[in-house]
Amino acid sequence: MDYDDDDDEDTLEQEEAIQQIEESDSDEDIICVVESTPVIEKDKAQPESYETDLEIEADSEKTFTTGQEDLYLEACKLVGVIPVSYFIRNMEETHVNLNHHGLGPKGIKAIAIALVSNTTITRLELEDNWILEEGALALMQMLHENYYIQELNVSNNHLGSGGAKIITDFLLENTSSLWSIQLAGNNFKDDTAEMFRNALVSNYRIKELDLSHNSFSEKGGEQLGYMLVLNEGLQILNLSWNQLHSRGAVAVCYSLRVNVTLKTLDLSWNGFGNEGAQVLGEVLKINSTLSYLDISSNHLNNDGANSLSNGLELNETLRILKMSQNPVTLEGALAIVLSVKRNPKSRLEEIDISNVLVTEGFVKQLNGVFAVHPELDVLYGDVIGTISKKVILPSALKLIRAYVTSQNISIFEFFKSIDHLGMTKMPVAEFRKALTVQKKVPLNRMQIRELIKKLDPYETGTVDYSEFEEQPKSQ
């Protein structure tokens, strides 16, 4: 078969993109260097903190992409680990989940070698693999070359202070495509908080950071609070299950006075008490970006609830407030919900006070709040003074089906009639409001809540009713 000159050149370029795995005198690190020319510059200088000792080249008879499986197998031979069949089968997918695979640092090295040239994986999950500092170094070396991975989960991997140093040094460079990193449960203590502060003060690429289930306390909270004052990238921060009390909690909360990017903050299970709640209340009066706040299990009592209510009366952005598992009673719960009633610009969609026992009087007061804010849902505990009975009500979908059958229309047409957006997808709050105010099918809030769970099972915040579009009217 004849080829023109251009095809000959393309073929030569593919054959020249070769890779081999060579073992050097040192076995401490891995190299993640991929050269596009046939001449490998083995003496090329590398950044001091990422000096490596392996060179990776591809099979000369295979293209850069199709040789990745062989590259991984050769890497496994080199470091002495058994190849992971799941990784081989999924290395061309966008999402690879290798959680709980027992990879260890050597297994991570082999995978890191293969990922240097991978252009398909954008989300990589490596939770609970005991990768240690050595594995963290291999991953950061790989990310120096791979600009396709955007989400990385290395939670519960015993990284410690050494691993935190390696990762924060990488984040300090602010050069990768990474925007989400999960680092929960890695035994990070207060000494690592300064590392994260320094890295994230100037890093604008990271949008989501999970530092939950670590050991940050007073000093750590102060450092993270300082970071939030200056950071201009983070939108989601999870600090749950740490030890943020007093000064640490106040520093994190106070930073929200000036932070202009954070939208989601999880501070649950920290125990910052009424002192932290008082600062949060003041912050909520002026913060204009936070939309999700979880302060569950933080030892807040009614005083803390009253402080929060003062902020909620003026806040115009918060949508979700979770504050269950706090010693709040009926008095504090009432202060929270009435503050929403007094705020015509409130955008709250959900308040979780599900451990609080309430009275029938509270329920009546709540109905008055719903009249002003029909998009709101409040999760509360049992009603005191009533006999607990399980009343089985027909589901919302069953009632809607009965209605559309009587009207000779489809379920899709019913949802379309209450959807002022006309997009077949609605924000949960808009959907709840539409079902509440419509009069065609009387539904209570419990029925609406269950219907939303059915149509948004993964809690994405959006209801998609397009699944009913193709169903005939009889269904």
Image (cartoon, grey):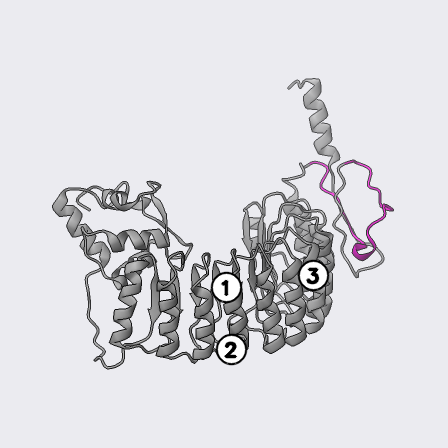
Residue lying furthest right: 43
**Residue 231 x %, y %:** 65, 57
Q: Earlier in the sequence, mark 1 or mark 3?
A: 3
Secondary element type, mark 3 = helix
Q: Residues within 10 Å of mark 3 (few under 14, many from 20)?
A: many
| Mark identifier at residue 48 | none
Label 1 residue SS: helix
As drawn, 155 above or below 142: below
Q: CA distance from mark 2 to mark 1?
A: 15 Å
Asked whether, in this view, residue 471 is left or right of residue 58, the answer is left
- Residue at coordinates 64% horizontally, 47% vertically from top-left? 177
Identify which residue is drawn at 56% across, 55% down.
235
> Which amino acid type corresponds to the residue marked 2 in the rendered image?
Asn
Say the numbered circle drawn on residue 274: 2
Decide which of 466, 43 is in the foreground and name it. Answer: 466
Whether label 2 touches label 1, CB < 8 Å? no
Residue 189 in sight here: no
Separation of disc 3 and disc 2 at Cα? 38 Å
Amino acid bearing label 1: Leu
Asked if the residue at tag 3 contacts the one at tag 1, i.e. Cβ–Cβ closer than 8 Å, the answer is: no
Residue 450: x %, y % from top left: 29, 61
Residue 284, disc: 1
Q: Which residue is mark 3?
A: 136
Give the answer, above or below, for where 430 lies relative to 359: above
User: Within 10 angstroms of label 1, few (less than 14), some, or many (20 or more) residues?
Assistant: many
At x 33%, y 75%, the residue is 381
Element on which disc 2 rests = helix
Q: Which residues are magenta?
A: 37-61
